[in-house]
Amino acid sequence: MVKVLSFALLSLATAISSVTALDQPGQFRRLGACPNMGCVFPPDSARFIAGSKFDVRVEVHAENVQPNNKYTLSIQKLGSNGKENKNNLKPVDFTSFAKVQPNAQEAWDFTYVKDAAQFWKKKDGDKNATTPVNVASTAWRQVSIKEPGTYKVTLKYDNGKKTEALWTVDPVPKKRKAKNVILFIGDGMTTAMITAARLISKPHSSGHYLKRMHMDQFPVLGHVMTHSMDSLITDSANSASAYNTGHKSSANALGVYPDSSASPFDDPKQELLAELLRRRSKKMGGRGGVGIVSTAEIQDATPAAVFSHTRNRDTKDVIVDQMIHGDNPVVPDVILGGGGKYFHSNNGGKSLNGTNYYETFRKEHGYKVIHDKDALLNYKSKDPLLGIFHSGNMDVWLDRNVYKSNLNKTDSDPTGSDAPALNQPNLDQMVIKGLEVLDKRYRKEGWFMMAEAASVDKMMHPMDYDRSLADLLEMDNTIGKTKEWLKRNKLDKDTLIVVTADHGHSFDVYGSVDTQLFNSVAEGQDSEKKHSIGTYENSGWPSYVDADGDGFPDKWDVRYTLASGTAGFPAHKENFQVSVNGTFIPAIAQGTSHHHYKEYVANPESAGINKESTLAGDQSVGVHSLQDVPLFAMGPGSEAFAGIMDNTEVFHKIADALGLGN
């Protein structure tokens, strides 16, 4: 893979000065990765595996007038140095090159805002705050380039204007390195969170840890840059999509380059890792197995990125259908998580066209459908497994295992009954059972599993740090049990394990808190309450102890806790203590507002130090952050993951290990 990466970077670097348009400053764009009025998707700097399939779309824009619908698209393979020279192939018509007929030319219009001033006027109902754009567009579907190299794609439009894009096509590896790959994603996980989780769960003496986390023991450490195609801060959809396609995208997009059309399902698609694995050549092992495990809704951004193509991550009813009815459906062998309300139309059900997808999965593909922990643990067959254990996101580890009475507060049964889901499995139980099924179905060919600890992120948003760190510890314990299972089943030498995050939060710890002193001070006396915060030599150590050795603190409601926080948050009150009665709710919508949108204030039912918002008033929870996220790797092919890398490179390294491409 080192040679493949060097080839790609060298080819791109030598051509960059002649073509590449640098990202322009500013917060709002007419359309992501479209630097002028002519748009090419995939855009500049796109990178492909030889033989992978992708869609191409061009758009010609015109503001307030109709666009010129006379335009051409050509492609030229550049020399080995990435530059044009006399030995290059000449530019050729794209349709002739791709041997794919384009769709009929389309026309539509859309609007956008040019800056923050217009954005807020639009939110307040000003219909004149947007700029109208008319579009002429053409799309080519299921394109494939099998010859490695650097290609220059040129859109000529408006009587002489042009947009150029460089595409790099990597050669296919000569042999696969790993038979199996497990990708663990701690959604939103950062190095600071891992440090805090280690502190509250592992014994230490004189400042030395006597035990380490399972992640700590991986031999390869890297860091991943998480930027989106058109913004410095990413969301979980396009960041997870980068891991599954090798392409950057925009917020909310899964497996596509977002175009400007109204439909979320006609955007140019990128072939997914799981789709490539399903059609892998016999030389590289043939069709491989696919498993998806998440503590979120299985239609949520990170798990959906394994099998879905949509501009809008919130089209969850269609996302369920895409699992088995998409253009090239992945039809995963293992699907375990939440999201039951999108499988049925019973009480609170939101399935597509009222379809009973539990029955559809069972009848059309032979899935065993289960809904609780006992059924999961007792499952011994090799049939494909669909386990949906909650109507929405699964409850977090802290409520499933410590504050269990909180489970009774919602009608969360995955089949739509009025009952709560009281018998949900833990992440390790889902992962191990998923591995058992994959091993039975694809022991010879190999398999890929994505396993997500979703609520590291989902609890970090409302600043419920205890619940977030508990789910991080659950993932770490799952990693340890996975390594044991692989070794016990003689698969450890054949399996690459990658552990990372899709993005970060700005969480960190800056000291400790004596909650006894904190609680003794009356509400409103913030300056006095802050005397309970110890920093530097006064920070000491927190009270958490793991006496039973299960990898979690025995008690979460302790005297000495962590002084921690984030940088981007709404107005709220902070008391540095576990929220015993359920997820912390930092802010609520104020009763009256002169705006057309909701404005949020600190939850009056919470107690603690007042924290003024660092965000706009329409934000009710914390937001993602910029920092690189950690990556840990072990097993065959793991050496490629050392160092700093772009999130798209994670896909290419996994694909190289599995021998994907044609």
Image (cartoon, rainbow, N blue to C red):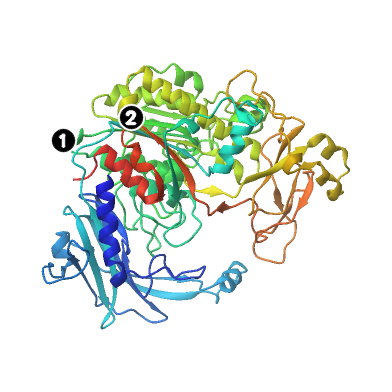
Q: Secondary structure at mark 2?
A: strand
Q: Residues within 10 Å of mark 1 (few under 14, many from 20)?
A: few
Instruction: Give the distance between the C-alpha atoms of the residues marked 2 and 1, in whole angstroms.
Output: 18 Å
Front-most of 215 and 390?
A: 215
Question: Residue 365 or 486: which is nearer the viewer?
Answer: 486
- Which residue is labeled 2 in the image? 495
| Residue 283's disc number | 1
Residue furthest left as drawn: 87
> Residue 515, position in %: x, y?
79, 36
Give left or right: position of 602 versus 418.
right
Residue 462: quarter of image: top right
Tell me residue 320's x, y (percent).
40, 41
> Callout 2 environment at 10 Å: few (<14), some (14 to 19), or many (20+)?
many
> Could you tell me which residue is drawn at 45 percent across and 75 percent down?
132
In terms of depth relative to the viewer, which is nearer, 406 or 623?
Answer: 623
Q: Residue at x 23, y 55 (%)?
A: 169
Type of the residue with mark 2: Thr
Q: Quadrant of residue 178?
A: top left
Q: Nearer the viewer, residue 137 or 351?
A: 137
